[in-house]
Image: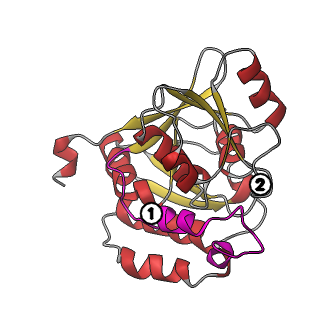
Amino acid sequence: MIVRLASGLAGATGVRGDVVIIDVFRAMTSAAVLLDRGVERLCWTVDVAEALRWRAEGRVDLCAGEVDGWPPLGFDHGNSPAELLRAPVAGRRVVLSTRAGTAGLALAAPSARRLWGAGFVTLEATARCLRAATPDEVTIVAMGWAGVRRTDEDELCAAALADRLQGRPVDLAQVVGRVRASPEARKFGDPAKPWFAAEDLEVALDANRYAFAIAVRRGPDGVLTALAVRPSPEDDAR
């Protein structure tokens, strides 16, 4: 298995093989929360207006996401894992719209053989699912802020996933500690930035909180949909 690391929107463009889009703060953490809480369907669009139109047409029940950290006008929820942990989402159809993770998925989808989303909360399950799929090549894309600026949490998560795919041990406590000390982590709980809840940081850095990977599929209508995929018991034993 060839494992490549890439960054940002440019790194998600024209990729081959299996592709993993990393967005720790916060899209893939929010997606994992929604899947764990039993949404009927979780789909993605970068276009805020499209998300609102889908809700108006009855194609989804709830809109969640952010632009520059803020929930867009008219959305039901922000891109906040802590908020989504408390929201009544079970059995609902949800569209998630963000600037980095969602954009990375949209760019990678046309050329990826298989597409995944990941963060620290699903790291080990993602590694196990990928190893079980035995792809010839995997590209792990650390999206960073809006896909244009590298951030420690995504770069470190991508590197940790690469290590696990290649059978190397990872000291996740040390990695998470480095993320906590990073400039990007300091915005959570900052009174000047109330849209970045302190609890979001805790959820996002709860490594291996969920025992499933986030697989992303393109439906017949062209819409990207997220699915929770659990590693097989045989692969868990590796």
The structure residue drawn at horizontal position 75% and vertical position 58%, both measured from the top left corner, is 69
Q: Position of residue 117 (x, y in %)?
A: 53, 47
Q: Dot 2, how many residues are within 10 Å of its Cα: few (below 14), some (14-19), or many (20+)?
A: some
Which quarter of the figure has residue 56?
Answer: top right
The structure residue drawn at horizontal position 63% and vertical position 60%, both measured from the top left corner, is 6
Q: Dot 1, how many residues are within 10 Å of its Cα: few (below 14), some (14-19), or many (20+)?
A: many
**Relative to 232, residue 39 above or below:** above
**Relative to 4, residue 159 above or below:** below
The magenta segment: 185-212
Q: Nearer the viewer, residue 53 or 99?
A: 53
**C-alpha span from label 2 to label 1:** 31 Å
Mark identifier at residue 70: 2
* Residue 21 showing in the rendered view: no
Please name the amino acid that badge 1 sits on: Ala
For residue 148, side relative to residue 92 (left or right): right
Which quarter of the figure has residue 198?
Answer: bottom right
Mark identifier at residue 162: 1
Which colour style is shown? secondary structure
Please name the amino acid that badge 2 sits on: Trp
Queried whether the magenta region covers residue 89, the answer comes back as no
The structure residue drawn at horizontal position 53% and vertical position 72%, both measured from the top left corner, is 156
* Residue 89 showing in the rendered view: yes
First in sequence: mark 2 vs mark 1: 2
Q: Position of residue 115 (x, y in %)?
A: 53, 39
Which quarter of the figure has residue 109?
Answer: top right
Assign a secondary structure to mark 2.
loop
Q: Nearer the viewer, residue 23 or 201?
A: 201
Q: Position of residue 53 (x, y in %)?
A: 79, 23
Q: Please name which of the two marks, 2 or 1, marks the residue nearer to the observer.
A: 2
Assign a secondary structure to mark 1.
helix
The structure residue drawn at horizontal position 65% and vertical position 79%, both measured from the top left corner, is 186
Q: Nearer the viewer, residue 47 or 55?
A: 55
